[in-house]
Image (cartoon, rainbow, N blue to C red):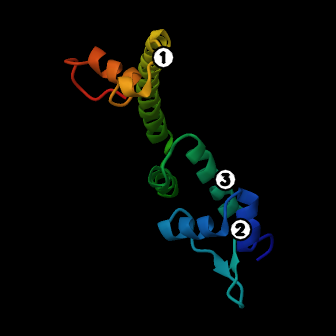
Amino acid sequence: MKGAARIGEAARAAGVSVQTLRYYERLGLLPRPERTPAGYRLYTADTQARLRFIKQAQALGFSLEETKEILRLTYNGRSPCECVRGKLVEKLKRVERELAALRDFRRELRSTLARARRLPHLPHSASAICPIIELKGLSHAGKGGDHR
C-alpha cells in the first residue's frame, strides 16, 4: 500500500504512543488497518488524519466517547457540526461554573491568609492542631456545606 506507514511511524506522526494507537483501534475510533504479509499494520493518510482529529478533539475537551460519536455521525453521512456546537456550549457552561467556583475558592484562600497573617505567632501547644484552619471553620459554622 503506497504511502502507508507502520504503527511506529503513524504514532510518532500523530504524537501518540503505539499503545495509544492500538487502544484507539480497540475502541473503534480507528478502522482496523490493513496488514503486510508479515502481519505489520499499515496506516493510510486517512487514518493519520483521523488521529490528528482525535488529538484536536481531546484538546477541546472532548472525551474519546464523544469523539467516537462525532466520527460515527460523519461516517454515517451526517454532519456532526450541530452536535459539536451543542457539546461546545455545554463545555463552555461547565468551564464558566468551574471558573466561578475557583474564583470563590481564591477569595476564601485570600481571606484565610489575611486572617492568618493577623494572628500572633502562637506556640505549638496553644492549639489542638492549627488555629488558622480552626478559625476558618468557626467563621463558616452554620453556613452548611463542605467548603474547599
Q: Where does label 1 land, which residue?
A: 121
| Residue 114 left/right relative to 131 | right
Alpha carbon separation for disc pair 1 and 3: 56 Å
Mark 3 belongs to which amino acid?
Answer: Arg
Q: Where does label 3 land, which residue?
A: 52
Instruction: Name the residue rendered at 44%, 54% in the picture.
Output: 65
Q: Position of residue 98 (x, y in %)?
A: 43, 28
Q: Position of residue 76 (x, y in %)?
A: 47, 57
Q: Nearer the viewer, residue 143 or 66?
A: 143
Q: Nearer the viewer, residue 7 or 75?
A: 7
- Name the mark nearer the viewer: 2 or 1: 1
Q: Nearer the viewer, residue 106 or 76?
A: 106
Image quarter where the N terminus lies is bottom right
Nearest to N terminus: mark 2 or mark 1: 2
Q: In the rendered view, would you say 105 is above or below 22? A: above
Q: Position of residue 127 (x, y in %)?
A: 35, 25
Outermost bottom residue: 37
Q: Which image quadrant for residue 30?
A: bottom right
